[in-house]
Amino acid sequence: MILVAAPNASKELDLDASSITIDVSGMNGSLRRGENDKDTDCWTCPSGEGFMIRGKNYLKDNSKVSY
């Protein structure tokens, strides 16, 4: 097996990248889809607010930055 690096593995996070949309209409389960993050007993798509990613020097200083 030959391991190949991802084409953009050395680049920073691209904030201009377009988001993807997943069609969930064909997915079935026992939980209903919620209206927002405050709904309970359901699932929702997370907003990403407060999401932290590894900073540029994470391997040295273990710091994360807000997305």
Image (cartoon, helix red, strand yellow):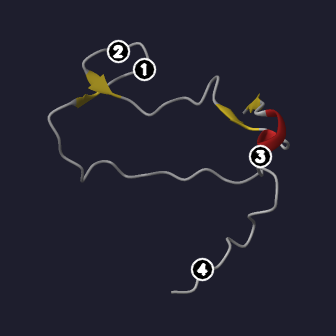
The residue that disc 2 covers is: 39
Query: Image height check: is 31 above or below 40?
Result: below
Disc on the earlier residue, 3 or 2: 3
Residue 41 relative to residue 53: left or right: left
- List x then y, in percent, for residue 47: 55, 29
- CB atoms of marks 1 and 2 within 8 Å: yes
Disc on the earlier residue, 1 or 4: 4
- Answer with the quarter of the image where residue 41 lies: top left
The C terminus lies in which quarter of the figure? top right
Q: Secondary structure at mark 3?
A: loop
- CB atoms of marks 3 and 2 within 8 Å: no
Residue type marked 1: Asn
- CB atoms of marks 3 and 1 within 8 Å: no
Q: Secondary structure at mark 2?
A: loop
Q: CA distance from mark 1 to mark 2?
A: 6 Å
The residue that disc 1 covers is: 36
The residue that disc 3 covers is: 15
In this orientation, which residue lies closer to the viewer: 18 or 12? 12
Q: CA distance from mark 3 to mark 1?
A: 24 Å
Q: Secondary structure at mark 4?
A: loop
In this orientation, which residue lies closer to the viewer: 4 or 1? 1
Residue type marked 3: Leu
In this orientation, which residue lies closer to the viewer: 60 or 10? 60
| Other residues around mark 1 within 10 Å, as few (<14) / some (14–19) / many (≥20) | few
**Outermost residue toward the front?**
60
Q: CA distance from mark 4 to mark 3?
A: 27 Å
- List x then y, in percent, for residue 5: 68, 73
Residue 63 relative to residue 37: left or right: right
Disc on the earlier residue, 3 or 1: 3
